[in-house]
Amino acid sequence: AEYGFLVHFFRVRGEKAQILFTNVMERTLSLLIKSVESYMEKCYDCIGIMLCAHITMHYHELMKKRGFGALVGFHNQLLQILWPRFTFVLSQNIHSIRETDPARLTELDTRPHFITRRFGEFYSAIHTLNDKFPNDQTVRSMSLLQVEVENVILRMAAEFRERQDQLVFLINNYDLMLSVMQCRTTDTNKEVLSVQELLNKRINEYVDEVLLPHFGGMISFVKDNEKLLESAGPGGGKIKVNESYINQIVRGFNQDHKKSIDSINSDVMRRFTNFNNGTVILQSALTKMIQYYSRFHKILSQPPFKTLPCRMDMINVHHVMVEVKKYKNQF
């Protein structure tokens, strides 16, 4: 508006108009620069600073399209204030997370920590803004911040004594982080894929942990004897058969598998804050249990185990699958 008034009132064009505009507005623009400098000295709002920088760049691009270069210097001065401050504040966030001592935090439980949610929301905001005017330095800094957040989550998990509690805490935090990040990014985003990989790894580890108390004997037998059968060759003549131990596994599974499945279901329902994630974990655990039982069946159908009387007492795999299906829609 000011530029248009000067052009029409003084009837100037081109370079003369821009010089006149600069002479008229110089003190006002200088005051604005000083005001921004003063405010930025005490500003620690990363998202706010980045918004200011992007608004400045937006108007800079708009002025270029209109062939108006009188504010180029002003915009550049603003950006020279905003970007260094943004980089500094972001580096302070990284340093703060890196120095976080879990022992000094409030008492931890297995639910997601507030740091995780704050990072997820912060990442989503910065990622969304950075899409408009991509900045490689911002991407690198956010990747470093993510690494530090993942490290502090690991340090917090180490505060729990039981391995299952550690895994539940990690899964709940990775799941929350992933859910928030996916709201603003694609599934092919490098950072999202990294968190997804961490989540899957811990889920697999938790599934193994939750099965061991209930089916540990069968799992160990399957793992050990699959290797022995592979190395022994046809007939399995070199394998020693511990019939009483196998009888114990078969009787134990027959008597307790329903109770064990119900216990696993209850444990998952109680521990995981995201019901959808809980469903995935429960199905993974029960599917893996069926896989181990199928492999157990297969081993006992081969020499030297196929003549054991206890094979006649084994529950059919199909019947176990029917039991598992009862828990399919618990969440």
Image (cartoon, rainbow, N blue to C red):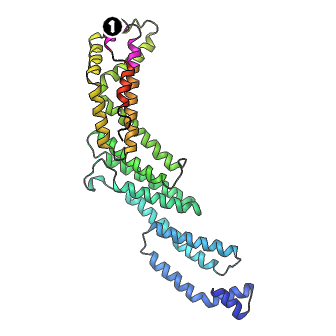
Q: Quadrant of the C terminus?
A: top left
The residue shown at (70%, 76%) is 66
Is residue 103 within the magenta segment? no
Query: In the rendered view, would you say 44 is above or below 124?
Result: below
Q: Amino acid at mark 1?
A: Leu
Q: Is residue 184 left or right of residue 303?
A: right
Q: Which residues are magenta?
A: 295-313
Residue 244 at x, y percent in the picture: 26, 11
The residue at 29%/27% (across/down) is: 258
Write down the residue under mark 1.
Answer: 308
Would you say residue 298 sits in the magenta stretch? yes
Image height of 193 relative to 231, above or below: below
Tell me the residue at 40%/29% (across/down). 287
Q: Residues within 10 Å of mark 1 (few under 14, many from 20)?
A: some
- Residue at 26% in and 24% down: 256
Q: Is 122 rendered above or below residue 215?
A: below
Residue 330 screen position, x and y as percent: 35, 39
- Describe residue 109's horizontal placement relative to residue 134 as left or right: left
Instruction: From the top left corner, tell me how far across and down residue 329 is, in percent.
Output: 38, 38
Let me know if residue 98 appears in the view.
no
> Which corner quadrant holds the N terminus?
bottom right
Quarter of the figure with residue 70: bottom right
Which element is circle 1 on?
loop
- One can see residue 171 in this view: yes
